[in-house]
Image (cartoon, grey):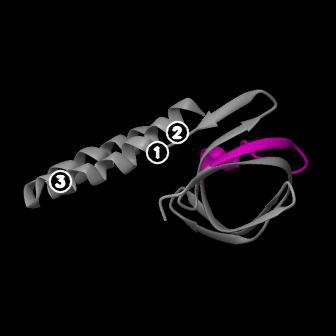
Amino acid sequence: MWSQAIVKGRLVAIGDGIWSGNTFRAATIEIGGSSLQGIRVAKCLLECMEAGAEMELLICSAHIYGVRVNGKVCKEGALRQLGWTLLVAVVLGWVLLPLAFAALIFVRRAYAIYSF
């Protein structure tokens, strides 16, 4: 649930999926010999992904937050993660102070996006 990974390889295909606002949930994404299922990707990152190209994908919790292709890096969602950090820290901090540390999960994800 809180995992993050960088997947490298040639993008073979992006399967069918459904749109929800500006987010596409692909049934499958085939890259580098792996088949990723149920992955969400923002429209701006989907436009950076072209079949047949070598690329790296930053995946955190079944959502693509970064694409590196042909030396170009496209990232999305770092500020949203910092917003979630603030929200979780404030809401859970009122309940019990140690629960505010759950916000560090979003800090870790934002750092991964910035450093990708």
- Say whether residue 15 is magenta: no
- Position of residue 6 relative to residue 21, above or below, is above
Residue at the image point whose x is 11% and y is 58% from the top: 96
As measured in the structure, the alpha-carbon distance from the residue carrying label 1 to the one carrying label 3 is: 20 Å
Q: Position of residue 66 (x, y in %)?
A: 62, 42
- Position of residue 61 relative to residue 101, above or below, is below
Residue 95 as seen in the image, left or right of residue 6: left
Q: Position of residue 47 (x, y in %)?
A: 71, 45
Residue at the image point whose x is 17% and y is 53% from the top: 98
Outermost residue toward the front?
Answer: 98
- Magenta span of residues: 42-58
Tell me which amino acid carries mark 1.
Arg
Task: Please say if the residues under marks 1 and 3 sit with CB atoms less than 8 Å apart.
Answer: no
Residue at the image point whose x is 38% and y is 41% from the top: 107
Q: Mark 2 or 3 closer to N-term?
A: 3
Read off the residue under disc 3. 98
Tag 1 secondary structure: helix
Read off the residue under disc 2. 112
Tag 2 secondary structure: helix
Q: Quick one: 115 or 76, which is closer to the camera?
A: 115
The disc at residue 91 is none
Residue 57 as seen in the image, left or right of residue 21: right
Q: Position of residue 36 (x, y in %)?
A: 72, 65
Tell me which amino acid carries mark 3.
Pro
Of labels 1 and 3, the one closer to you = 3
* Callout 1 crowding tier (Cα within 10 Å): few <14, some 14–19, many ≥20: many
Task: Please say if the residues under marks 1 and 2 sit with CB atoms less than 8 Å apart.
Answer: yes
As measured in the structure, the alpha-carbon distance from the residue carrying label 1 to the one carrying label 2 is: 5 Å
The disc at residue 109 is 1
